[in-house]
């Protein structure tokens, strides 16, 4: 199993730089702010050792997204914004999960459970 490596932090830096300007998507996307980047870095640093590396993306609302895509029906994603909330959604086989959790210092248990569930399926 891969470990979280500097490559994920590098991807975060690249995505944030590409999405820093308003309308980065060619439409009306909100820019990714420095506060969002800081929250995203904190989220990555809070993931426990052994967590597989996610892919990094940005959303039109200016949030950064981490996704652990393992198969079409095994995908959790976490959206990180500047406000300290984590919005998550997951499809694991025939079940769906989604919600919002506060992020203070630790990755909330429901999010870790979804990542682990996808990785161990």
Image: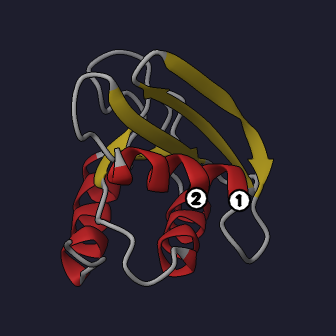
- Image vertical order of residue 86 relative to residue 88, above or below: below
User: Residue 104, how many percent across, how many down?
Assistant: 79, 70
- For residue 58, side relative to residue 55 (left or right): right
Does residue 118 show up? yes
- Image vertical order of residue 102 relative to residue 6, above or below: above
Q: Where is residue 109, by image quadrant?
A: bottom right
Q: Where is residue 99, by image quadrant?
A: top right
Look at 31% across and 56% down and name the residue there: 54
- Image vertical order of residue 82 relative to residue 62, above or below: below
Look at 49% across and 64% down and name the residue there: 37
Look at 37% across and 79% down and name the residue there: 50
Classify the position of the N terminus by image quarter: bottom left
- For residue 87, side relative to residue 76 (left or right): right
Helix, strand or loop status at disc 2: helix
Q: In front here: 107 or 27?
A: 107
Q: Where is residue 92, by image quadrant?
A: top left
- For residue 100, side relative to residue 121 (left or right): right
Q: Residue 120 bears which disc, if any?
A: none
| Residue at mark 1 | 109
Report the Cα–Cα distance between label 2 and label 1: 5 Å
Does residue 32 show up? no
- For residue 20, side relative to residue 106 (left or right): left
| Residue at mark 2 | 112
User: Residue 117, how many percent across, how many down?
Assistant: 47, 48
Look at 24% across and 81% down and name the residue there: 5
Q: Residues within 10 Å of mark 1 (few under 14, many from 20)?
A: few
Q: In front here: 14 or 115?
A: 115
């Amino acid at each position: 199993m891969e470990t979280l490596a500097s490559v994920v932090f590098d991807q975060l830096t690249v995505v944030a730089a590409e999405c820093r300007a308003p309308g980065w998507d060619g439409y009306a996307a909100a820019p990714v702010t420095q506060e969002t980047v800081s929250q995203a870095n904190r989220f990555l640093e809070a993931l426990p050792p052994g967590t597989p590396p996610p892919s990094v993306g940005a959303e039109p609302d200016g949030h950064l997204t981490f996704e652990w895509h393992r198969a079409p029906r095994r995908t959790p994603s976490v959206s990180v914004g500047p406000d300290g909330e984590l919005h998550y959604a997951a499809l694991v086989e025939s079940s769906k999960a989604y919600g919002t959790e506060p992020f203070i210092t630790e990755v909330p248990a429901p999010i870790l459970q979804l990542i682990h569930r996808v990785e161990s399926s």
